[in-house]
Image (cartoon, rainbow, N blue to C red):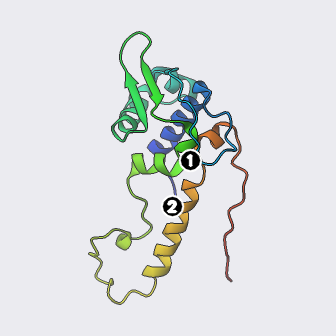
Amino acid sequence: MLRLSKKADYALIAMKHLAIKSGAHRGAALPVSAALPVSSVAASAREIAEQYDIPVELMAKVLQRLVRTGLLVSTQGTRGGYTLSRASGTISVGDVIQAIDGPFTVTACSTDNNDCEQYGKCSIRDPLWQIKERIVATLSTVSLAQMANDQVTEQVPVAIRR
């Protein structure tokens, strides 16, 4: 079954927390590309971890990875901590998950290295790649601003054949 890693869960929790704290999530009905101002209200790894009962060391590692991938900015000092690198309306759930877990895959052949023995004869590769692309596209349609406003209510059309 498809499932997010615990680190991806924690990253989404932290990013939503920062979106709410910054106040930049207001106006989440705007398109994902809408430029909203990024506030400088920072939160520490300890603050986020304690609020959600997450181990501080693990939260710190998750936040550091989000900084390395450019989704967060880290500031040192007494008023330091972590802030969103850009407006919450421009950061998607897919961006956060891929920053933590890497590119989304559903099969061994979902990457470009084609090292599966069945690659040349596989009859399910293309349909599974299409499913993967739909999942990635869906994750990219939900912004942090929408999550922060609890506006993730749109139904994504899914065709089910029996």
Q: Secondary structure at mark 1?
A: loop
Q: Residue at x 36, y 70 (%)?
A: 108
Q: Secondary structure at mark 2?
A: helix
Q: Which mark identifies residue 120?
A: none
Rendered location of residue 35, percent (x, y)? 56, 39
**Would you say residue 33 is visible in this rendering?**
yes
Determine the CA span between mark 2 and mark 1: 17 Å
On-image quarter of the C terminus: bottom right
Q: Which mark identifies residue 33?
A: 1
In the picture, measured across the screen, residue 22 lies left or right of residue 27, that is: left
Q: For this rendering, which residue is in front, 142 or 32? A: 32
Please name the residue that numbered disc 2 is placed on: 136
User: Residue most toward the bottom?
Assistant: 121
Q: Residue at x 49, y 21 (%)?
A: 42
Rendered location of residue 67, percent (x, y)? 37, 34
Label 1 environment density (alpha carbons within 10 Å; few <14, some 14–19, many ≥20): few
